Image (tube, rainbow, N blue to C red):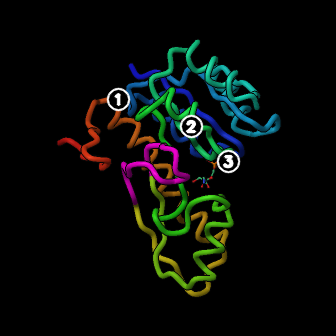
Amino acid sequence: MLNIGVLVSGGGSNLQAIIDDCENGEIKGNIKVVISNKEDAFGLERARKHNIRAVFEKNEDKVIKILKEENVDLVVLAGYLKIISPKFISEFENKMMNIHPSLIPSFCGDGFYGEKVHQAVIDYGAKVSGATVHFVNEEVDGGAIILQEAVPVYFEDTAEDIQKRVLVEEHKMLPRAIDLISRGKVEIIDGRVNILK
Ligand code: GAR
């Protein structure tokens, strides 16, 4: 069983997708703790409803301490809108993943989060967007890509339309990426991910 720690800043719909798949056995894992840097994050509420330890904590050293206390094997950034320090990253090297609502390397990096990403897609006139699950390294949105899914972008779309379309894919791919890791199917070779059959 993989011990999972999830970090959230907002609504936590991706967290909910992970909770559901842990409960229905799709993922062989246990969410040991959910931590948020925002006291009113609905993600904390979702965790409590499922009897998962939910912690509001802004201090990074304390966040690391809690994750270690819970013997977390994999840290999942599920809408965690706070930049992670190099120290935190090195503590969980190749054991921390993030989901980003675009096809990296487009529409990513500092300042690209939530609806801003989708508005940038519209402003640019891109015809496809999507989501990416990747390992976390020192570069914002820069680690090895684990999974990507594309969605179409239509001329009439609002940022909210694209967000909704992308979220449908996110809710499938984030649990899938965790499942692949829990089954030892993800290897990193020269900074690239190979998914084993
Ligand atoms: C998701 O779309 C996620 O990809 C994005 O925040 C949203 C959180 O939704 N993350 C980023 O923009 C990170 N740069 P949720 O709280 O409902 O899971």
SS type, badge 2: helix
Image quadrant where residue 180 sits? top left
Please tell me which residue is depicted at 66% across the width and 74% down the height of the picture.
119
**How far across and how far down the image is residue 70, in percent?**
56, 14
Please tell me which residue is depicted at 52% across the width and 31% down the height of the picture.
75
First in residue order: circle 2 vs circle 1: 2
Please tell me which residue is depicted at 40% across the width and 28% down the height of the picture.
25
Count of numbered labels shown in the rendering: 3
- In front: mark 1 or mark 3? 3
Q: Is residue 27 above or below residue 79?
A: above
Depth check, front residue: 24 or 22: 22
Going by the numbered disc 2, the residue's amino acid type is Pro
First in residue order: circle 1 vs circle 3: 3
Residue, far right: 40
**How far separated are the C-alphas under marks 1 and 3?**
25 Å
- In front: mark 2 or mark 1? 2
First in residue order: circle 2 vs circle 3: 3
Image side of residue 35 versus residue 178, left or right: right
Magenta residues span 133-148
Q: Which numbered dot is residue 182?
A: 1
Going by the numbered disc 3, the residue's amino acid type is Leu
Please tell me which residue is depicted at 68% across the width and 66% down the height of the picture.
116
Image side of residue 55 versus residue 134, left or right: right
For disc 3, the marked residue is 81
Q: Is residue 136 magenta?
A: yes
**How far separated are the C-alphas under marks 2 and 1?**
25 Å
Q: Is residue 45 magenta?
A: no
Label 1 lies in ligand 1 vicinity (Cβ under 8 Å): no
Q: Is residue 11 above or below residue 166?
A: above
Going by the numbered disc 1, the residue's amino acid type is Ser
